[in-house]
Image (spheres, rainbow, N blue to C red):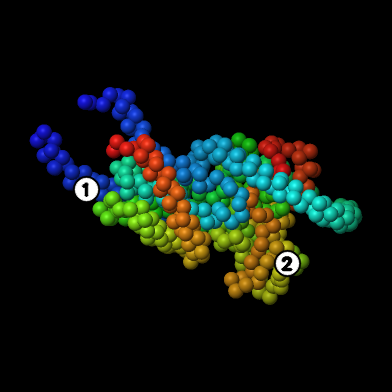
Amino acid sequence: MRPTFWQRLDAFARNLTPVALTLVLVILNVVPTHIPGIARVLPVLPLISVFYWSIHRPHLVPAPAVFLIGLFQDGLTGAPMGLHALIFLAVQGVVLFQHKFFMGKSFLVHWLGFGLVGAGAAALSWALLSAFHVTLFAADAIVFQYIMTVAAFPLFAFIFSRWQQAFLKLD
Amino acid sequence: MKEPHSFSRVAQPIRNFAQRFAYVGLVVAAFALMMLAKVDTILVERARTHMTDAVAPILDVLSRPLDTVNRGVAEIQAMKNLYEENTQLREERTRLMHWKSVAEKLEAENRVLKEQLNVIPEREASFVTARVIADTGGAFSQSVIVNAGARDGVEKGQAAVTADGLVGRVIDVGSRSARVLLLTDINAKIPVLVDPTRTRAIMAGTNLARPRLTWLPPGAVVSVGDSVVTSGHAGVFPPGLRVGQVAAVGEGGLIVQPYVDLTRLEYVRVLNFGSGGILQLPQRSIGADTPGKERGHRP
């Protein structure tokens, strides 16, 4: 049976949610918390989102969308334009390259994988930042940020998996 | 059923190739954008400004509940040590009363001396008070977004302060939002004076919590506890804004502890000095002729 117009619209709207959720996380990431020192080590939430959806619904977060998410992150955080676009694309590239490995694996494997990919992303961002500012960057903030991001992964992966079951089950 | 199958068999590799091509293209585009941003084209900055401006209303709404919670927490904490604070304030008041009389005497003396020397009076500052709606003080950059923009009279290059001292400089202005580069950002280089000796130096941000003093003249004597104020050289900042205190003399140079707690910014004042001047007391500048409108106040 051919889906009706409304069914298609419904499916379309549902399929937009991974990207929309990621954009929301970009905004949430910069809302001031006023907790001393926390802003420096706040997890990079969109990174978790890009990683998760690249594993579970790769066709819903195509590369151009990831690119735009990265630009949005750069625009809001004041990081050099293109920095996060590059990092998010790299993360997505690695995940898609190893997609067969991640498919059907347990949560722990995904977490571990995120730990590795996140470390690569942190190293890449450090290298890019250092190159951009032509100075050796203090790495401690990036390392802390990486640890916080990996620590935040289970919570957000849980939220995304519930979301996936609720809204994107038919895929 | 055979038709679409064979079609997809042909189309799939082409699609894969196109996707891979798009991916590589995007990576290259991201790289190119970074290069472009490095050359500092207006185009990239304008894109950023538009982006920030578009999201500003959302951020404005989202940051409100957190602000309220924070204020509540602060009030409860204040309630707890009301008694000690009261005693402390009483002591401080006695001390400040003394200082007030000294300041009044100095002010009078200063006025007389200036009259004698025919010093050109400096313009008083007007200011716009803006709320911080986004705090991006991360590992990548140190800046905040405030909810006042060009329509409120904010202009690029103006200094942002709180009652405690200097916060940073306005680097991007949208119509309803502006980005303030904090003095800790790696791009922040502020000409300062180290006070008792009036030693000129440049305070350079490092993206860490405390900026460094560089380019001191040879033989300069600076010790821990010296206060740092803006010098007004290079015309970036008006002279005489309180910045911080020399906190440590380490191997990385002289470390400055800013007076403002940059992690807990709620409201900042964006100063409009026109051609420059010395920071006046806010009550004085708000009463007389204040073109900038006030938006909220520091609690």
Above or below, A109 against B133 in this view is: below
The residue lying toward the viewer, choosing from A154 and A130, is A154
The residue lying at 43 percent from left, 44 percent from top is: A159
The image quadrant that residue B116 belongs to is bottom right
Q: Which residue is drawn at the image coordinates 32% and 46% (left, top)? A: A56
> What is the C-alpha distance between the residues marked 1 and 2?
63 Å
Q: Foreground residue, B285 or B120?
A: B285
Give the quarter of the figure containing the N terminus of chain A: top left
The residue identified by callout 2 is B225
Q: Label 1 lies in what chain?
A: B
Cβ atoms under marks 1 and 2 closer than 8 Å? no
| Residue A51, position as x, y percentages in the image | 37, 50
The residue lying at 32 percent from left, 38 percent from top is A169
Task: Mark yes or no: residue B9 visible.
Answer: yes
Q: Is residue B137 visible?
A: no
Q: Amino acid at mark 1?
A: Phe
Q: Return the residue nearer the eye: B103 or A6.
A: A6
Q: Is residue B22 left or right of residue B180?
A: left
Dot 2: element = loop
Question: What amino acid does circle 2 point to?
Answer: Gly
- Chain identity of mark 2: B
> How many numbered marks are there?
2
Residue linked to disc 1: B17
Q: Tell me if residue B179 comes above or below residue B217 in the rendering.
A: above
